[in-house]
Image: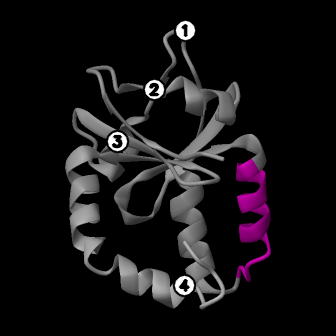
Amino acid sequence: MLIGEFHHNLDEKQRLVIPTKYRMELGDSFVLSRGLEKCLCAYSNKEWEKLVNKISVLPFNKKDTRTFSRSFFSGATVCEFDKSGRINITSPLVSYAGLKTKCVIIGVNDHLEIWDEDAFNKFLDDNASSLEDIAENLFDETVTL
């Protein structure tokens, strides 16, 4: 399970250190793709395969399926760690997520998300007041957090 929050800087060559804890969960290689809300998502090969299988059964005749598939798969790239535990993030992905220097890497159960620090802070601020309502809408009374 991927959990936690780490802050690292993107260097001038678009490399980012991924914490050891996450590297062990992702394996030697993994897939990095565009995520939702303008972040990047990193999936172990096992989790990527699960996601591909879910998308593969969506009806291709639906425009939403084609649009989502194009965006999601065209930005996907296989990553490997260098000796220092860094990954090289492609220019299109850096641009998509608006990554500058300061980045936040968070574990979200089955995947990682990589955010520009300012964008992540804005996301947290924008959603802080509605978190209770979101939890209430997602969970019934039998589930306690």
Q: Position of residue 20 (x, y in %)?
A: 55, 23
Against 143, residue 80 (above or below) is above
Provide the residue designation for mark 3.
Answer: 104
Who is closer to the viewer here, 95 or 46?
46
Question: Disc 4 vs disc 1: Cβ atoms closer than 8 Å?
Answer: no
> Which amino acid is tagged 2?
Asn
Between the residue at mark 3 and the residue at mark 1, the CA separation in whole angstroms equals: 21 Å
Q: Which mark is residue 135?
A: none
Between the residue at mark 1 and the residue at mark 2, the CA separation in whole angstroms equals: 12 Å
Between the residue at mark 3 and the residue at mark 4, the CA separation in whole angstroms equals: 26 Å
10 Å crowding of disc 1: few (<14), some (14-19), many (20+): few
Rendered residue at 64%/53% (across/down): 110
Q: Is residue 129 left or right of residue 38?
A: left
Who is closer to the viewer here, 69 or 133?
133
> Which amino acid is tagged 1?
Lys
The nearer-to-camera label among 3 and 2 is 3
First in sequence: mark 1 or mark 2? 1
Q: Is residue 5 left or right of residue 3?
A: left
Q: Is residue 30 left or right of residue 16?
A: right
Who is closer to the viewer here, 143 or 125?
143
Provide the residue designation for mark 2.
Answer: 88
The nearer-to-camera label among 1 and 2 is 1
Q: Which residues are magenta?
A: 47-60
Question: Disc 1 vs disc 2: Cβ atoms closer than 8 Å?
Answer: no
Which residue ends up furthest to the top in the rendered image?
Answer: 83
Residue 130 appears in which quarter of the rendering? bottom left
Rendered residue at 71%/51% (across/down): 48
Q: Which mark is residue 138?
A: 4
- Mark 2 secondary-structure assignment: strand
Against 106, residue 36 (above or below) is below
Provide the residue designation for mark 1.
Answer: 83
